[in-house]
Image: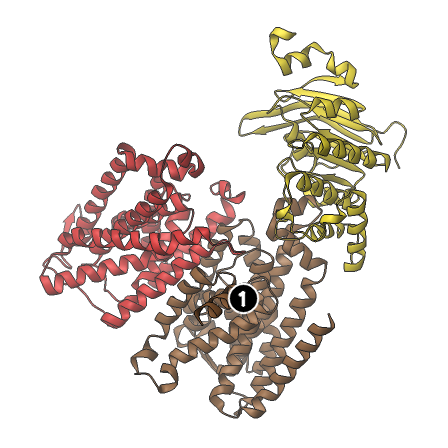
Chain colours: A red, B yellow, C brown
Amino acid sequence: MTVFFQTLVSGILIGGIYALIGMGMTLIMGVMGIINLAHGQLMMVAMYITFVAYTFFHLDPYLSLFVAMPCLFFLGVAIQKFLLNPLMEVETIIPQNQVLMTVGIAIVLTEIARFIFSSTYRSVTTSYTGKVFFLGGISFNVAMTVAFLFAVTLTIVLFWFLLKTDLGRSIRATAQDKEAAILMGVNSRRITIITYGLGAALVASAGSLLIPIFYLFPDIGRPFTTKAFVITILGGMGSTVGAIFGGLTLGIAESMGATYIGMSYKEMVGLIIFLLVLIFLPGGLKRLTKV
Amino acid sequence: MVGASMAFFEAQEIGKTFGGLKALSDVSFTVNQGEIFGLIGPNGAGKTTIFNLINHYYPLTSGDILFKGKSIKGMKTYQICHLGIGRTFQVVKPLKRLTVLENVMASAFCRVNTFKEARELALDTLEFCNLMSEKEKPAKSLPIAGRKRLEITRALATQPELLLLDETAAGLNPAELDEAIELILKMRDKGVTIIIIEHLMKVIMTISDRIHCINYGRTIAEGTPAEVANNPEVIEAYLGESYA
Amino acid sequence: MKRNQVISAIIAVVFIILPLVVTSDYYRHLAILALMWVVIGGSWNLLAGYTGQISFGHAIFFGTGAYTAGILADKLGTSAWLGMALGGFTAVLAGLVIGFICFRLRGPYFALATIAAGEICRLIAVNWESLTNGMVGVLLIQTFRSKLPYYYVALALAAASLLVFNLVMKSKWGFYFVSIREDQDAAESLGINAALYKNLSLAISAFFTGTAGAFYMNYMAFIDPEVVFSLPYISIMAILVAIIGGVATIWGPAVGALIMVGIQETFRSAIFGLAPKWVSQSHALVFGLMVIFVILYLANGVVGDWPKIKRLVVRSR
């Protein structure tokens, strides 16, 4: 039974960070209607920023959160402004070229990172790396717990922003009904740019939070893109609350899968859940089937 | 075979519910072979819903639909077309990047299998509908009148016995309107039975043999154009209570 | 009609004679890869360009075909050429499963589902070690030492695929595919069984992609999951080949295959050894930049955007 609760706790802790990653992608999905397949790669960039800040300036990863987030915000803004928005005017038979563009961005980011840092595994060893504390017989990884608490705080801030500020309301309005939002005077172009920046900043925070726990290498982005993708779909496309549930579900499922099925199948668990939802729960995805 | 007692087309107490909201309840009517049957009602009354139920764009919640004595309930949209029921859409759906001729050919393949036969059938239908001059143009370049006409031509090329026309006259100018009426009558004379949804009273009152009026998803009247026009409930539905 | 046939015949003759003139193994190798991509790009184009079902998962079919040939030879000791005959059919089976799951979704959601399906296939190949040897991959002994036989097999495959795509698109099926792309609801109301024809398009597309995959196994004699189930280098490459050449044209993907393989190899070889070595390490970066460039500026491909390209060239002179 202890094993079960231990697995559950690790699942929830990592799930909180997954939620952070998923919410960024969900925001972008909601406003632009596209899946951002460069999401994990944006996180990878944030991780390298954190790594550099730690190695050269001895900045604690939790402090470089406040460097990585703005950096990625502006990177996201630039991507949306110069690469994604221009595609709205291109008329083609292939309507999915924005998604394809994000794949191109993902490759470019990964390869630039490889160019600068090579494929070597990097890590940041802080005073709290590997430390654990016990609560009722269950061990809590310190770095993981801190990351989880940060994730919860950032989620609360994000919800406050979406619910209480004008800009947040404009974002939600655009996500609900783009045409109507434009008619109400929302500058949809500006909103898409800010949303992509925000999504990038959110995933950047996850990157900074994860660096004391994970090894860093250029290809680390891809599995996280897949995770973000699965979370977004589990959570019902474009629903921020759904992303939290999706993130926790994926975290717990992966953790359970690793304990009870085998470590190597961890990555597959999320994708299988995704397909099961698709086959057996078409009701959950119903509004997607008639576009 | 169609017996004397058997209706050509019959809707039996059909109903449709969307997530608890009743869009249509217990609507029944029969259509005789060779007639033009008008379907009227205020906006949102459920007219297009009836068409969507007939060609199974979505399934019936209750009731049954019989075509030549056989139930078509549960049949797929494309099967219903093969059976001989064609339809047009209120919001026209041209195959935009294809030419007008290709649009019609795509539907002609419903009856024939080779490229050559499909082309011939498509050209005949275009001729019949007076759209020959536009045949090489991409469908998206047509003005609204042309698109509405293409919609009819395309449905006709599937050689239907029953044709459902959804507001084919909306948005046309008076000259185009006369041409549309002429085309509808010509199709009827060719032997096609027609159910037509129309807002313009001038059109529906002149061409329909019988009219069925619904409001809030329920039948409020049925009869000849004159009978329906003088029905107090119909007048009330269209003009408001004070005129009744 | 006649003119097209003459041009096709001339192109065919050129490609038949080509390897007899070009005797360098290196260039023959490039030609073989390009011909293989003609098949894959065209297959993707049939499903996505003509039928409108944008697949981000063609690696599924490529990998299935490759592993069919590989596993048959590796585990049962049959000729890998038998595998090539069967690879297309196993890919069709994979395609029917994918179709059953993914065709429940429309438009962008179909595309997303194919990404997930592709990743699942890659992970299965990685983890099912008793069947696939996992990350170790499958190694065969090549049948021929010369490139020439492989070249002609690839050429025959490319010619067959182009012929089939051409015939299909001129038939009732082709009309139906395009109708579904333009408006699925309208297509169904015109008597088109959209589910059936989408699956047919997928099956043809999967068949040729799978055969190409099985050919790849035979020719390269080595595969592993990261190579044949790769999202960027198979699935995205297939899309890029079709787009750069011209989506929804018969010849577009073929032209695109020549261009893409040419550009990729130019950078992989560091501009044929003329540039410093770091250039060759950047070929993946160049691939990514190509994706971005093509979508921004050549969305309708060389064939589709030809007037635009001509204008640019003329003006710059």
Q: Nearer the viewer, residue C50 or B71?
A: C50
Circle 1: is it few (<14), some (14-19), or many (20+) Cα within 10 Å? some
Q: Is residue C102 left or right of residue B228?
A: left
Q: Nearer the viewer, residue B226 or C133?
A: B226
Percent position of residue C6, x then y: 70, 77
Which residue appears at 71% of the width and 40% of the height? B149
Q: Quadrant of residue C82?
A: bottom right
Q: Nearer the viewer, residue A132 or A189?
A: A189
Q: Nearer the viewer, residue C303 or B106?
A: C303
* Residue A141 visible within the image: no
Asked if A239 appears above or below A250 in the picture, the reply is above
SS class of the residue under badge 1?
helix
Q: Which residue is mark 1?
A: C306
* Residue C3 visible within the image: yes
Asked if C155 appears above or below C294 in the picture, the reply is below
Percent position of residue A60, x then y: 11, 56
Percent position of residue B51, x then y: 68, 33
Residue under mark 1: which chain is it in?
Answer: C
Q: Is residue C116 left or right of residue B189?
A: left
Residue furthest out toward the right: B4
Three-letter residue code for mark 1 = Trp
Asked if C127 appears above or below A33 in the picture, the reply is below
Percent position of residue C228, x then y: 46, 72
Q: Is residue A62 left or right of residue B9?
A: left
Which residue appears at 88% of the width and 34% of the height? B2
